[in-house]
Image (cartoon, rainbow, N blue to C red):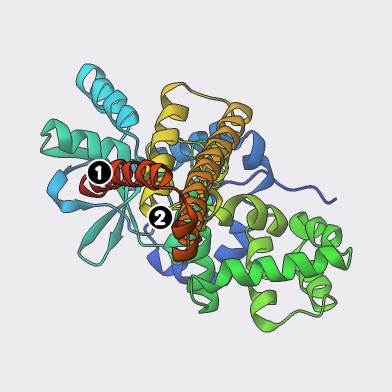
């Protein structure tokens, strides 16, 4: 495996005054290729250090500006779409007690100022009623979403749903494929390469150079769409098999579980809770959703582990299965009783003595009263 240089975020924006340099997409892509493996395990702190270097560089070139908050806009291409209430409250306390310690980084896009880094500070300051924020500004770089993706992708606190949506959006933008088709195409090619025992060779390409990646992909007998998706994932130095197994499944979660993830639920817990489906529970979608939401609340409040969550889900499914069996048994008993009554033909009734008929008549009258009560309740 060839060695990788530590990624340098400040290089992506070097010479911020020369905006024409930022249009050289090919050169930027080569520079961006260095961003990856170190960030995966240890570079959350390193990334913060590089952002600080970028702020310092921009301060020396352009200075710190006081920007009216109403002129600042969130970047819709920002991969992070989840901002937990607790996180925003913590930032608000920090701003109130210590003030704004770091300027936000804004990107100039025509007449708009988009947030590149510092959306939590912007949201919190806005909630506090602040009128301005300290900021440094850079011209819009090419591939804005790509840069936002790379600077966020390997941060430890980026939840898997935000990550899945950001990656899918990037793949769709570059390839032109429909968003909903991308997970299916990736899953198909990963399964095929697994069955061919060639998935390992694909994973080995994550840290390879562009030429080797291209050469190896040519040998895998891929469709155009499969090749485009794998090529871009490798370019982002992401493991296609891992994205298929652990990240893209987030996109197919029930909406209530997506909301729970955005509120702080872990992705692995959400995948376990997804098994509480209408099909598995033998219930309507609405009833299944109600049970799933109740169980999700229990998982969050009690801070259950993944193992405990899976056990709880299995217990809920088993419990609902028992209820269904009991209901079916009762229905069967009523049906059997009805069938037996219908077998009491006129000839059999004629053969019975009056005392037996009077007893049967009383039983039937009593049961008819009970049936009327049940029907009124329903």
10 Å crowding of disc 1: few (<14), some (14-19), many (20+): few
Secondary structure at numbered mark 2: helix
> Is 306 displayed left or right of 295 in the figure?
right
Rendered position, 173 above or below 52: below
* Towards the viewer: 257 or 261: 257
Residue occupying the point 44% across, 43% down: 54
Residue occupying the point 67% across, 65% down: 187
* Towards the viewer: 16 or 370: 370
> Is 93 displayed left or right of 299 in the figure?
left
Report if residue 145 is visible in the image.
yes
Secondary structure at numbered mark 1: helix
Q: For residue 346, which quarter of the picture?
A: bottom left
Rendered position, 264 above or below 304: below
Q: For residue 356, which quarter of the picture?
A: top left
Rendered position, 22 above or below 104: below
Residue occupying the point 82% across, 63% down: 194
> What is the x, y in percent for residue 192?
79, 70
Residue occupying the point 14% across, 39% down: 132
Which residue position is annotated with label 1?
369
* Towards the viewer: 213 or 343: 343
Report if residue 237 is visible in the image.
no
- Front label number (2 vs 1): 1
What is the CA distance from the residue labelled 2 to the residue labelled 1?
35 Å
> What is the x, y in percent for residue 163?
51, 51
Which residue position is annotated with label 2?
285
């Amino acid at each position: 495996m060839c060695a990788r240089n530590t990624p340098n975020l400040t290089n992506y924006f070097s010479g911020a005054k020369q905006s024409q340099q930022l249009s050289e997409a090919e050169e930027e892509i080569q520079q961006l290729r260095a961003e990856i493996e170190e960030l995966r395990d240890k570079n959350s702190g390193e990334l913060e250090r590089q952002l600080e270097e970028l702020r310092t560089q921009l301060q020396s070139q352009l200075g710190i500006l006081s920007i009216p908050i109403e002129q600042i806009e969130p970047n819709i291409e920002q991969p992070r779409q989840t901002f937990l209430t607790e996180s925003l409250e913590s930032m608000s306390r920090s701003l109130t007690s210590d003030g704004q310690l770091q300027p936000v980084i804004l990107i100039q896009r025509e007449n708009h100022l988009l947030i590149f880094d510092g959306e939590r500070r912007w949201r919190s300051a806005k909630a506090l009623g602040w009128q301005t924020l300290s900021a440094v500004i850079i011209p819009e770089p090419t591939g804005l979403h790509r840069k936002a993706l790379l600077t966020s992708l390997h941060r430890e606190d980026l939840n898997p749903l935000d990550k899945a949506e950001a990656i899918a959006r990037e793949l769709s933008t570059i390839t032109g494929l429909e968003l909903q088709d991308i997970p299916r195409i990736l899953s198909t090619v990963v399964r095929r390469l697994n069955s061919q025992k060639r998935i390992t060779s694909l994973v080995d390409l994550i840290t390879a150079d562009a030429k080797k990646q291209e050469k190896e992909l040519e040998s895998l007998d891929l469709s155009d769409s499969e090749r485009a998706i794998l090529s871009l994932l490798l370019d982002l130095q992401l493991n296609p098999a891992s994205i298929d197994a652990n990240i893209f499944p987030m996109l197919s979660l029930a909406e209530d579980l997506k909301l729970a993830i955005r509120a702080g639920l872990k992705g692995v817990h959400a995948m376990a809770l997804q098994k509480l489906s209408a099909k598995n529970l033998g219930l309507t979608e609405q009833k299944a959703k109600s049970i799933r939401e109740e169980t999700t609340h229990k998982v969050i409040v009690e801070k259950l582990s993944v193992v405990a969550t899976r056990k709880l889900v299995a217990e809920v499914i088993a419990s609902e299965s028992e209820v269904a069996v009991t209901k079916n048994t009762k229905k069967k008993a009523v049906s059997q009783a009805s069938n037996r009554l219908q077998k009491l033909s006129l000839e059999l009734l004629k053969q019975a003595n009056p005392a037996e008929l009077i007893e049967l008549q009383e039983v039937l009258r009593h049961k008819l009263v009970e049936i009327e009560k049940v029907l009124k309740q329903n």
